[in-house]
Image (cartoon, helix red, strand yellow):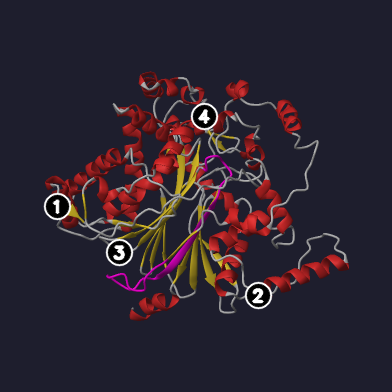
Amino acid sequence: MCVCPGPRRIGIPVRSSSLPLFSDAMPAPTQLFFPLIRNCELSRLYGTACYCHHRHLCCSSSYIPQSHLRYTPHPAYATFCRSKENWWQYTQGRRYASTPQKFYLTPPQVNSILKANEYSFKVPEFDGKNVSSVLGFDSNQLPANAPIEDRRSAATCLQTRGMLLGVFDGHAGCACSQAVSERLFYYIAVSLLPHETLLEIENAVESGRALLPILQWHKHPNDYFSKEASKLYFNSLRTYWQELIDLNTGESDDIDVKEALINAFKRLDNDISLEAQVGDPNSFLNYLVLRVAFSGATACVAHVDGVNLHVANTGDSRAMLGVQEEDGSWSAVTLSNDHNAQNESELERLKLEHPKNEAKSVVKQDRLLGLLMPFRAFGDVKFKWSIDLQKRVIESGPDQLNDNEYTKFIPPNYYTPPYLTAEPEVIYHRLRPQDKFLILATDGLWETMHRQDVVRIVGEYLTGMHHQQPIAVGGYKVTLGQMHGLLTERRAKMSSVFEDQNAATHLIRHAVGNNEFGTVDHERLSKMLSLPEELARMYRDDITIIVVQFNSHVVGAYQNQE
């Protein structure tokens, strides 16, 4: 995650067999909560993700401007970064600048890249408990980092009601975002369970009996689970629900969704920290939990239950509601706040949590301690642990950790940790018939498009209705021939059905390929998707999008009942 004006690197993920959904009874603990990871993905995770955060910070493959990085390396790392002069020689050696090529991807090739990670799910109108207010969702991802640092998750709550959907933006590698995407929904689901159900689950696990799962996952084949860590993750989750059982006497089963979301976020972050401190005798797991803790991730999660919509956000991904007005036009309603230097309340919170003599050092150059862009995140223990604890864990850790300059580096002006929290800000919204869809997306989207344009594009795509606005040229000198071309393009777009069958894919197409007139330019789109690995990240971030479509008739029926 970063603040950058345009693309990162593009890789075409290899498709693999799909993950089974949890619908049948299965024994606890491992099969109950965590599906299997394919062998090829395990090797990919171990072979590349192990070092991705080190590579990201030290820019070992290319020079990346610091303004484009989620985490800015300290000047002490200057020797690890490729200088701008060397970068020029590097690009000349690669012959990018000296021999420009007029190579463009064909439309089928563009579509192959854009659709490689798309996923759609249609919700049954009646799920066995109640009529769902969600018609379904579309999701997609476009990588810029290698491996991609974004993750996404979607699941139906089986023991309670509602759906969970979330996007996760990793930084300093993908380890933390991967772990959070696997684990957070289980912590939320457990936090929402009544006391009696928690007791049933604990008794079944204790006796080794089979029981029904608590989540039904809706996953693209590339959205894998870490098989190696499933037992460790399960044990931490079980400890959490055992504590919930002890704290709740069962006198009241009224669950506060906002409180449950906050508790789940904070508890998972605490477990990530504790697992890294304790370590594991298994060398692979020991390094895995340390990578998770030393990298970081933001999260934006929506829980939809009937007309009740809760959005829990930690970091700077966003949730945007698409509202259709009476005249058919679209308006955007923001359901999350960015936790960064552009948020005055976040700046004030940080300053109040630390001594007055740190007022000028806690945020420098719009970054936490001059380094980190988001002010809330999972992991990132370098901004949470004491210096003594960091040194102890690193010294007792594996050689890979001890040899990593990033993990040994202590942030400047580091006096009163923790400086970072994973506690989410939760916003509640009661759905109305005019609320047509919800967009969850990492900051790679919002850096390239205005929220109003995002909502309009999705709204027009879902309804097939296009409100014609006068073509704005924004001060450009446009010839009559160019204007004719723009009108022809508009007519072609209206007369043909969109080539995308997925709203998230359609939005990514616009985010990457829009020209100055707000229309998709195939030549521009082809160029952006053709950028070599070393250059793509300089232009944009990873983009991950989930578009949730609501059932207006069901929402209206809820409203009429009251």
Q: Residue furthest left?
A: 207
Task: Look at the image and tell me in which quarter the N terminus lies.
Answer: top right
Residue designated by label 1: 249
Q: CA distance from mark 3 to mark 1?
A: 22 Å
Q: CA distance from mark 4 to mark 3?
A: 41 Å
Query: Do the numbered discs 3 and 2 sit on residues whose CB atoms are within 8 Å?
Result: no
Residue designated by label 2: 467
Q: Disc number at residue 143?
A: none
Q: How many marks?
A: 4
Q: CA distance from mark 2 to mark 4?
A: 48 Å
Q: Residues within 10 Å of mark 3 (few under 14, many from 20)?
A: some
Picture coordinates of residue 402 (x, y %)?
Answer: 44, 20
Q: Disc number at residue 54?
A: 4
Residue 449 visible somewhere in the drawing = no
Mark toward the start of the polypeptide (3 vs 1): 3
> Residue at the location (43% across, 49% down)?
223
The amino acid type of the residue labelled 4 equals: His
The amino acid type of the residue labelled 1 equals: Thr
Residue 530 visible somewhere in the drawing = yes
Q: Disc number at residue 161?
A: 3
> Residue at the location (54% across, 60% down)?
504
**Kind of element beneath mark 4:** helix
Above or below residue 205? Residue 44 is above
Picture coordinates of residue 240 (x, y %)?
Answer: 24, 44
Q: Nearer the viewer, mark 4 or mark 3?
A: 4
Mark toward the start of the polypeptide (2 vs 4): 4
Above or below residue 207? Residue 400 is above
> Residue at the location (86% across, 60% down)?
477
Above or below residue 269? Residue 123 is below
